[in-house]
Amino acid sequence: MKRSKPINSSSKAKPSRLERQTAAELRDLQRLMARAVMRPLTPAAKMNPRWTDGTLAKNVVASFIKPNDRLTSFERLQLYNRQYWFRLLDCLHDDYPGLQAVLGERKFSRLAREYLSECPSASFTMRNLGQFLVRFIESNPKLVAPDQHLALDMARLEWAHIEAFDNAAKTPITADEMRAANPQTLRLGLQPYLTLLRLNYELDDFLIAVRRGQGLRHEASNAMENRRERLPNKSKKFHRSKAFYLAVHRHRNSVFYKRLRPDQFALLSALQQELPLEAAFAKAVESANSAKFQPKQITKWFQDWSALGWFCHAAVVKPKRKPRCPPKTNSL
């Protein structure tokens, strides 16, 4: 039997075992990566060459990302940084085509970049990306000047559209349940997907035309019946009116814009506060400048609104605090 050759231990040295990361170290690395990916791009749509403290970003990036045979550490991370921002900007363009139409591409793009820098995505779903846009415009009117009132109305309408498209729906109250209830104690709630808007501009027709032209989520308005479809004129002059009332809601998986009279808006707004039905009527009469509600007229309204499924049981909950805009990215 031949004797096997001895193994040269020096040529077969065991590789040193890498130290395992602790949970705290992994968390710090994840935060560092998030900060790098979410940092705003330069005006040329590139990753910022300077880190948050003013040092060269490439040195910081090289400490946690390896280069390869084609790209440096900085160039590898820049791919993710740009993809992240391009995706967010695309989502805002998709969700706010009306705002883009009234502001113009250049002004809207600047607004989108400033907004995302101040209020970065903080949700698992892109659906919530524009949840702070109305308040951001209110706080930064120069970004949409001289059309700040028009921009605010359009932003409100388009956020209401998003809410109507996919917000929750509760079991509706039937007409028989309402008739059998005591109006002094009955508390009606409105569906979570329903938004009541008091606007200064009649924007429903314009937004419908914009969305139909872009093939976006389906919507309809009771003001558009029997009208020939046409694309909007983006140079259209919008005339500010005294008040324009609108209900944005969902019906059979489509979004609708339903125009309301002032007294209808007053009554629905009172019901939205989940007051007892009798108290809601009294509040509506007061807020509608003592308008006289006709019983037959109110019965017809309730029949229509009930058929649309707008009413649900009121939920007795504590008032929620308004969500605050998340901190800037560089505070991560």
Image (spheres, helix red, strand yellow):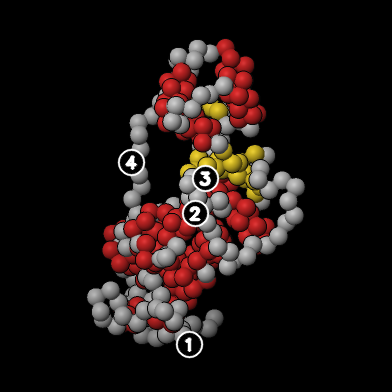
Q: Which is more N-terminal, label 3 or label 1? A: 1
Label 3 to label 4: alpha-carbon separation: 28 Å
Q: Which mark is residue 240?
A: 2
Q: Earlier in the sequence, mark 1 or mark 4?
A: 1
Q: Amino acid at mark 2?
A: Arg
> As rendered, which of 191 and 201 lies closer to the eye?
201
Residue that numbered label 4 is attached to? 321
Q: Position of residue 139 (x, y in %)?
A: 33, 58
Which kind of residue does numbered mark 4 sit on? Arg
Q: Position of residue 289 (x, y in %)?
A: 43, 31
Q: Earlier in the sequence, mark 2 or mark 4?
A: 2
At a point 48% along the width and 27% down the height, the residue shown is 291
Q: Residue at x 50, y 66 (%)?
A: 103
Local packing at callout 1 (Cα closer than 10 Å; few below 14, some 14-19, many 20+) is few
> Does the image show residue 294?
yes
What secondary structure is found at the residue carrying circle 1?
loop
2 or 4: mark nearer the eye = 2
Q: Secondary structure at mark 4?
A: loop
Q: Secondary structure at mark 3?
A: strand
Identified by mark 1, the residue type is Asp
Q: Nearer the viewer, mark 1 or mark 2?
A: 2
The residue where tag 1 is placed is 69
